[in-house]
Image (tube, rainbow, N blue to C red):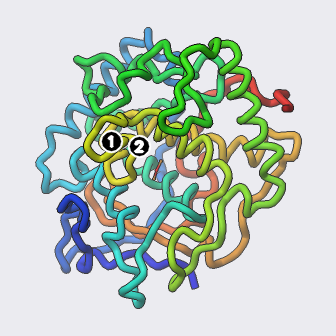
Amino acid sequence: APIRPPDLGNCRPIQHDNLNCCPPYCPTTEIVDFRPPSDSSLRKRRAAHRLVNDQEYLCKYELAVARMKALPDSDPRSFSQQWRVHCAYCEGAYPQVGFPDREIQIHGGWLFFPWHRLYLYFHERILGKLIGDDNFALPFWNWDAREGMTLPAIYTNEHSLLYDKKRNPMHEPPVTVDLDYVCCDDDPTLPREELIEKNLKIMYRQMVSNTKTKELFFGKPYRQGDMPHKGSGNIELLPHNTVHNWTGDPNMPNCGEDMGVLRSAARDPVFFAHHGNIDRMWNIWKTCLPTSPNTDLTCPDWLDASFLFYDEEARLVRVRVRDCLDTTALGYTYEDVHLDWLHAMP
Ligand code: C2O
């Protein structure tokens, strides 16, 4: 059977750190079923490194984040609740309904792509709502393109709300991201051009050579009653995990905060740009590769897995994996960017 939505009345604080990641909830809260958005225009997510000089966009994005941070903690749309949504779904806050000793875990298996897509979807719409802009779209961190292989500059200005101080101080721009980074194997002697070529080959390997089966792309099946972490898909392992680890600060007491630790990762606004690119990879895998068209899984236990999110009106929404397979139907798309790795056959 598919993973069922959590019972928000049965959410547990995280043991570790005494962190409470449970969302505001009262038993009378109505749960509504997801309906695709009806706005007519498509939100276009653009590559973060191309936005440095777009003052108009940056003002909007920063204003939206400022308003999100200014909401009271009791509001599920506030920044402090938004990052906790990720924490709750990854640190065992929700037992599976009917299996009190098994947690709902959205990493390490086939829920990885759809859950994060939906998380960004609601987050983006809340940001747009806060500035009254139905077209607002998150940027994506284009780490698979030569020009995008540094921490995007828009996130690195200390005076901006997009900044987070819990990052690796050695990885400020112009340092090149290492897509198969393992903490802390920095090699400052490696010429930038070589690292870029290595990254492009990694992208080719992870997107083309290593995804011959759907399971290798999406991850292993994970159903109601299963123990979590059945097996990650290739993209989740790399570059997803590696870019998280590369970004976080290894000197923090909990080695790797913010980005390098699951429960704190979404406290860093760059999380949403990183996941924008992960989400973009799902679309690219389906339509743009030599092996395409690749199709989504068809197993009902995947399609009917469902989650709860608060939407831009603070309504509690139940949404299924099958609701999120088409990004156009969700009202957004990605800027077309050249795929530098498409012919980077190792
Ligand atoms: Cu849910 Cu990038 O982690």
In this rendered view, identify the residue nearer to me: 150 or 28. Answer: 150
Asked if the residue under mark 1 is in contact with the one under mark 2, i.e. CB atoms within 8 Å, the reply is: yes
Q: Secondary structure at mark 2?
A: loop
Residue extending furthest toward the top:
53
- How far across and how far down the image is residue 139, in percent? 47, 30
Could you tell me which residue is drawn at 29 percent across and 47 percent down?
254
Could you tell me which residue is drawn at 29 percent across and 30 percent down?
164
Q: Which residue is mark 2?
A: 260
- How far across and how far down the image is residue 152, in percent? 46, 21
In this rendered view, identify the residue nearer to me: 203 or 301. Answer: 203
Q: Which residue is mark 1?
A: 257
Could you tell me which residue is drawn at 59 percent across and 71 percent down?
230
Q: Quadrant of residue 226?
A: bottom right
Image quadrant occupied by the C terminus: top right
Could you tell me which residue is drawn at 20 percent across and 62 percent down?
20
**Amino acid carrying mark 1 in the image:** Glu
Q: Quadrant of residue 149?
A: top right
